[in-house]
Amino acid sequence: MSRLAVVTGGSRGIGAAVARLLASKGCRVAVLSRDLDAARAAVASLEGDGHVALSCDVSQELEVKAAFQEILQSCGKITYLVNSAGINRDGLLLRQRASDMRPLLEVNLMGSMLTCRAALPSMLRSPGAAVLNIGSVVGLKGRAGQCVYAASKAGLEGFTRSLAKEVGARGVRVNMLLPGFIRTSMTEALQASSQPLPIPLGRVGEVEEVAQAALFLLLSPYVTGQALLDLDRDRDLDQDRDRDQDQDRDQDQDLDRDRDLDRDQDRDRDQDRDREQDLDQDREQDRDLEQDRDQDRDRDQDRDRDLEQDRDQDRDRDQDRDRDLEQDRDQDRDRDQDRDRDLEQDLDQDREQDRDLEQDRDQDRDRDQDRDRDLEQDRDQDRDRDQDRDRDLEQDLDQDRDRDRDRDRDQDQDRDPDRDRDQDRDRDLHM
C-alpha cells in the first residue's frame, strides 16, 4: 500500500501545492481544511486514488482528535505530516486586542502541536516517517506590524527543533520550511502594489516551487531538526517595506512638526514631571518583570516534569495496548479454531440428517407403491362386484319381463269370454 500523507491547510496555497506533488509521487493524501467543500475540491484534483478530504479546525483539540482517528481507521498508518494551516492579521501591537492575538497563536503554533501529538503514535510505527512545519522568515527576522504572527512562527521553529530531538531516536524526522515572498492569498495586498519588488530573480515565488523544497525535506533520510529558509528574497522585501515605512514616517513627522510647534513649551514643562513618573513606573515594572520571570521559570520546570510524566505514561499505555492487542489476537485465533470445529461438527450432523432423510424418502416411496397396489386390487374387486351386480340386475329384469308377459296373457284370456258374452247379449237385444 502507498504511503499516507496528511496535509493541514491543504485546500489552497502552499498546502494544496504540496498535496498535488505528493499525490503525483504515488502517495495517498488526506487533506484537512476548515472548509470541507474546498478540501473535497482539492482532493478531486489530485492524481491517483485513495485520497480523502476532512473538515478540521486545527486550533480545536477535539476536532483534531476526531479527524486523525477517522484517518487511522479508514486509511491506516501515517507516514508524512505537513502542517501548512496558518492565518495572519497584521497590525501594530499597541492596537492589537488579546482576542486578535489568540487565533494566530492557536492556529499557527498550537495547531501544529495538536496535529503532531495526534499523528505521532502512528508515525512511530511507520518507517521513514517525517513531519514538515511550514513557517516564515518573519519568525526569524521579525517585521513591523507582525509581532504576533512572527511570535507564532518563531515558536513553531523552537517547537520543530525540540520535537526533532524527542522523536529522532524513534526514526521520525521533523523539519521546518521558511518561505520568502510567495504568490498566495496571504500576499495579495503586496502583489497588488504598484511599486516593484526588489527580488534578485526578478519575480515572486510560486507555491509549486515551495512544494519542491517540502518534498526534499520529507524524503531526505538524514535531515532533521533543520529550518530551510529563503533569506535573500525576504531581505529584499524587508528593505522595500522599510523604505515605504520610512517615507510614511517622514510625512507624518512633517505634519506632526507643524502641529506640535505651538505645544512645545507646555510639553517641556510636562516632560520633567512625566519623566519622574516614568522612572517610578520603570522601577515598578522591573520588580514585576523579575517576579514574572521567577514564576515563568517555576512553570517551565513544572511543565517539564509534567511532560516527562506524560511521556512515561504514554510509553506505559503503548506497552499495555500492545499486550492487549496480542491477547486479543490470541483470543481471536482460538475463537476461529473453535468456530471451525463447530462448523465441521455441524456439517457432519447435516450429512447424517441428509442420509436419514434419504432413507425416509425411500420408505415413503415403498409405502406409496404398496398403497397403489392395494388400491388397484380394490378397484379390480369393485369392478367384479359391479359386473356381478349388473348380471343379477339383468336377470331380475328378465324375470320381471317374463312375469309381465304371463300376466298380460292371463288378462287377455279373461277378457275373451266376457267379450263373447257381450256380443251374444247385443244380438239378443237386436232381435
Image: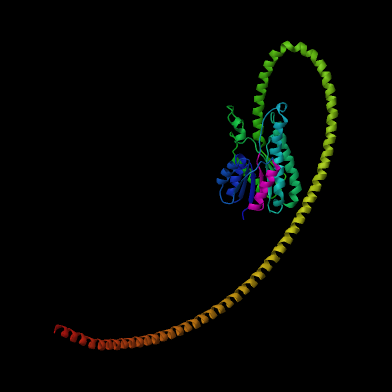
Name the spot of residue 417 as percent of width and height, x first.
Answer: 23, 88
The residue range painted magenta reads 60-85
Rendered image quadrant of residue 404: bottom left
Name the spot of residue 85 as percent of width and height, x first.
Answer: 65, 40
Rendered image quadrant of residue 268: top right
Is 73 on the left-hand or right-hand side of 275?
left
Query: In terms of depth relative to the viewer, which is nearer, 374 or 33?
Result: 374
> Is residue 423 positioned above or below 183 on the image?
below
Is residue 328 among the parts visible in the rendering?
A: yes
> Is residue 307 positioned above or below 362 on the image?
above
Is 278 on the left-hand or right-hand side of 89?
right
Residue 64 among magenta residues: yes
How many numbered discs, if any?
0
Residue at image position (78%, 49%) is 311
Name the spot of residue 303 as percent of width and height, x first.
Answer: 81, 42
Is 88 on the left-hand or right-hand side of 363?
right
Q: In which quadrant will I find the C terminus?
A: bottom left
Is residue 142 among the parts visible in the rendering?
A: no
Residue at image position (41%, 86%) is 384
Residue sitting farthest toward the left: 431
The chosen color scheme is rainbow
Query: In terms of depth relative to the viewer, which is nearer, 151 or 94?
Result: 94
Residue 164 among magenta residues: no
Q: In which quadrant will I find the N terminus?
A: bottom right
Residue at image position (64%, 51%) is 4
